[in-house]
Image (tube, rainbow, N blue to C red):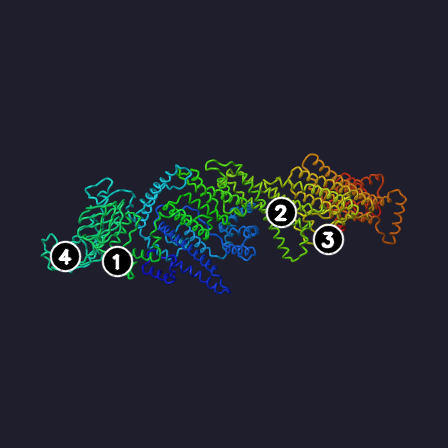
Amino acid sequence: MLDPSSSEEESDGIVEEESREVMAPQSGSSRISPSRTSESSDRLQPASRGSSARPSSPSPSAASEQEKEDVEKLQKEEEERKKKLQLYVFVMRCIAYPFNAKQPTDMARRQLKITKQQLQTTKDRFESFLKGDTQIVADEAFINAVQSYFEVFLKSDRVAKMVQTGGLSALDCREVFKRHIEKRVRSLPEIDGLSKETVLSSWMAKFDTIYRGDEDPRKAQQRMTASAASELILSKDQLYEMFQQILGIKKFEHQLLYQACQLDNLDEQAAQIRRELDGRLQMADQIARAGKFPKFVSKEMEAMYIEELKSSVNQLMANLESMPVSKGGEFKLQKLKRGHNTSIIDMGQEDENQLSKSDVVLSFTLEVRTVLKLNRSLVFMCVLSWGTQGDFTTTHPLPAVKVKLFTESTGVLALEDKELGRVVLHPTPNSPKQAELHKMTVTKACPDQDLKIKLAVRMDKPQNMKACGYNPDNLMGCICQYTFAVCSYREKKSEPQELLQLDGYTVDYTDPQPGLDGGRAFFNAVKEGDTVIFASDDEQDRILWVQAMYRATGQSHKPVPPTQVQKLNSKGGAAAQMDAPISQFYADRAQKHGMDEFISANPCSFDHALLFKMVQRLTLDHRLNDNFACLGWFSPGQVFVLDEYCARNGVRGCHRHLCYLGDLLERADAGLMIDPTLLHYSFAFCASHVHGNRPDGLGTVTVEEKERFEEIKERLRVLLENQITNFRYCFPFGRPEGALKATLSLLERVLMKDIVTPVPQEEVKAVIRKCLEQAAQINYQHITDYAREEVEKTLKDQKDPENVANLATPAKKLEHVIRLAELVIEVLHQNQDHHAEAAVTSTGDQSAFAWWSDLMVEHAENFLSLYGVEMDAALEIQSPESWDSFPLFQLLNDFLRADYHLCNGKFHKHLQDLYAPLVVRYVDLMESSITQSIHRGFERESWEPVKSLTSNLPNVNLPNVNLQIPKVPNLPVPVAGLSVNLPQMPSFSTPSWMAAIYDSDNGSGTSEDLFWKLDALQTFIRDLHWPEEEFAKHLDNRMKLMSSDMIETSVKRTKTAFESKLAKSSRSTDFRIPLSLCTMFNVMVDAKDQSAKLCAMEMGQEKQYHSQIDELIEESVKDMISLLVAKFMVILESVLAKISRYDEGTLFSSFLSFTVKAASKYVDVPKPGMDVADGYVTFVRHSQDILRDKVNEEVYIERLFDQWFTATMNLLATWLTERMEQQLHVYQLKILIRIVKKKYRDFRLQGVLDSTLNSKAYDTVRNRLILEEATASVREGGMQGISMKDSDEEDEEDD
């Protein structure tokens, strides 16, 4: 934009350049601006070329119609251009001299909006981070949060729509991410030394780094600072440039208008304001006299209307008084009064209503500076040094400055300096400022009789003197303080001789007056028949005086100098305007370019209501298209100009806000995002005005305002209801912040009948309830369309037409319903996160819209009911043998039970009613299936450890056992009496992933299968998280009881198999404990462990029932140990039976002894009985090792070993007691010693306690054997090294 103070040469160049581009308008056409003519002609030229190129020319009638339309179009464009130029003149004056409004500094700062390109750049940056292409270090939790933010927010079509409507800013993106991660961070476990606030801050810093990318943060900060500064306050030049863009004004047009309007002349602008205000007062009087009032809602308002007009003008007068005349001035502008002062006033006739002497006493500043220095030593009377300046102040408009020149006296007795000469000057404000030579009046003592001095005398007029003129007799000045006056001063007088107050006068140029002396150019001031004629020396001086008095009188008629008329009527007018001032040159040039009509137009003759509506609409369009997410809010500079325009031109506030509301509603209907708080402000103002409840008192209300208000109110109600209906899309992700709450508040205000009576809450709730019912349908339709588009896209990518037919299959239907359920849950989560805050005030109080949460719950139920229809249809076609729909229940139930408002709600109960029979049926079938598997399994059970069965199974991928939706156990066997076709269960083989669920080994196949199925079934039922307490308790109890019954059956069948297996085994020392027996023990161990988990009860008989299971297991284990110990005793009895043949006194014993003695003389005979002892010891050790290695329960092993050792010692003690009267055979003694010693040592190594080892039976056996050993040692042959005493040789032998 050109500087208003640019030089005349620069402006001439611009104008000439523009003029050369102009085409001359045709004669007879309406007057068109040269610039617009060139534009219109350029636009028409392509059309003419196009028409000439057509094969057939149109008919003359068609061509004339086309020309007529073109002419009409040009005329409309020209009228619009003229209107905008006139409007720009008014706006320029508001900017140049504001006296009512200031640029507000307390408005909320608007953020820069995000464009489509910036959104795409942001997406690319986040995608690069997720791909790992950046250097940002992040943990898995943060990456998951960014991934969710990227998928849910950045890729959302609602965000793209926000960008399209200009409502998304970088701050919105940041706030959405912050809210998105807050719940995630709060749910993280506590870490010592690391607070969650620190984690939040760290995540937000990483988000800022990703969002910023490689951009230099300093440049971004500088750009944001510059944009924020321009958003806060604008200079006048910036305001001019802004409204040039708004109104489509060219640069040279602005320059012409600026210079011709003298916008840099504050006095001219103040005079223009006074003329406008005077015109408004006259218009008010005309309305009162003619009775042409607007149509008001009440007849009594007509008188109030006149008072309003006058009151507004008086307020403007007061504001105008408070403004300084010019920058730095201390005087005030005239106070406008409609007085009747006449004629020139003699100062002796002072009146209290007239100016006093003090009102016209002026203060002048004089500067006297010496320039020439003489050879002699000279001084000034004012004691000035050569080349310096002296400043003086005087109240005389025509002062006399006397300068004396002295020389120093060299005489010894001289008391004073010697005067050489003097000069008297009479400066005026119009005197030359440069230094001049002045001839001095010399004394006789001066040797130089032609003495001259060069002085520069400058006299500055005060700021309240607007013009002055000088003749040899007096000084006439136009003075402004609180009123304007023309005064005539005499020389050396501070008070005026004559005074003329200019109130009510009209100044204009006049023809030369013959017979009057004192000047060559004349002008007069006329008031009610009184005429005062003024004269000036030249034309330029006359023009300056007329302009000054024109500004002072405040008259509406603008005088036109005769030189301008002559210039227009003559071809060689250049010489005629040589004497004109520069302001007159600008005015002439503006008239040349057709701008004079806009400058000289009377503002009071325009309908400023229509003009303001136009400028406000264009300003709003400009604001919505700038770089800020304004949401309809004007910038501070725009608010300032519009406020000043309304105040200066009397635009009614209600009209202003009604037009604003209308424009905002149009933009909102077009899809642009408008802040409801802004709508609320304007609506509240209009409502208080129409209903007569304005804060500043009662005001007039026109019928048009009331009708337009009712129309706007209805449009606003429709808009608000539509926004609430589409709240997910009008306020996506809760942006703008607090907009939904503001919308609810505004709707409540709109539904009020008047400004005082509040609307009943039930009525508001009924309206919003209806909107949310429609919102449920719209939102569900959106997600169904989205799901359908996903399916279509998938099929298109697969390029498989056969899949189209598969879409109607039950499995595809179920898959579609599950996908819909995920979308439904996502929508409800977003509603809860981003749209539930409308019920909470800024202080956290929920009393503002406490019912909003209830309505949102109803909305969620309606939304779920729409989904329930499709869910019911999909589940209805599912096969009764299929259990694939359970994941759908778990998905929905996990969401619903976590929501306090939806848990056990209408849809939740419907879901339970739908799945309860299915769960019962599933449990029944699983119970029958497991029962059958137990029966068949134990019939075919090999009792080999599962570990050996599964050791050679192929490796398979482990399933994800951490999924929220566990796999539903299948039914492997048919159930008698049921109509379902269940697959035949094969022989059990443990799944390779069983360890992830149940960690056990060396159990039987049937028991492992049983425990896994029971655990999987209970896990599945438990993961259902059935919400109804009674049914959930019933299911849990049934699972526990079923597990107890099946474990009891398993225990009994295992015990029976143990007895059968043990009964069929060998009775000799060749017996080796089979692995199957150990497996049976392990089954008991597992049954005990699993019963604690699968059969745990909490109350009453159920707990007692569980204790019975434990007792059953304990009794069964006890019986199995007893049976095994009994088996061991049978084997020991067989050994004792063998050595019983050596009892003393039997024939077999004597014969056997003789045979051995006889044979030992010739051959090496083995020691009789040692093979028996060695075989038994080997049997014992092998049995101990197998039991210790294969049985998983240490307690059972210790119990078995204790009973085994005790039973052995008791049996030996009994056997020896029976032979108390007999002496043991040496071979019997050797075998028994070896068995007892080895068994004692082995059982001690196995951990049998000393209290058990050193029992009474053991002492009895040991003492008997020691006694027998002492007796046998004195016999022939002795014991041959076998003794009850411990020795190292025996230890080495054992090893």
Q: Secondary structure at mark 1?
A: loop
Along the polypeptide, which appears first: circle 3 or circle 4? 4
**Residue wearing tag 1:** 579
Mark 1: which amino acid? Answer: Asp
Side of 878 where 426 appears, left or right: left
Q: Does 62 sit above or below residue 1098?
A: below
| Residue 1073 visible to an observer of this rendering | no
Along the polypeptide, which appears first: circle 4 or circle 2? 4
C-alpha distance separating marks 2 and 1: 89 Å
**Residue wearing tag 4:** 440
Q: Percent from the top left, x then y, of residue 776? A: 58, 44
Side of 382 where 50 appears, left or right: right
Along the polypeptide, which appears first: circle 3 or circle 2? 2
C-alpha distance separating marks 3 and 4: 136 Å
Q: Which mark is residue 821?
A: 2
Crowd band around label 2 with a 10 angstrom C-alpha radius: few (<14), some (14–19), many (20+): many
Along the polypeptide, which appears first: circle 3 or circle 1? 1
**Residue wearing tag 3:** 951
Mark 2: which amino acid? Answer: Ala
Along the polypeptide, which appears first: circle 1 or circle 4? 4
Which of the two marks, 3 or 2, is nearer to us in this view? Answer: 2
> In front here: 1002 or 428?
428
> In front here: 647 or 788?
647
Do the CB atoms of the residues marked 3 and 2 lie less than 8 Å apart? no
| Residue 952 visible to an observer of this rendering | yes
C-alpha distance separating marks 1 and 4: 35 Å
Do the CB atoms of the residues marked 3 and 1 lie less than 8 Å apart? no
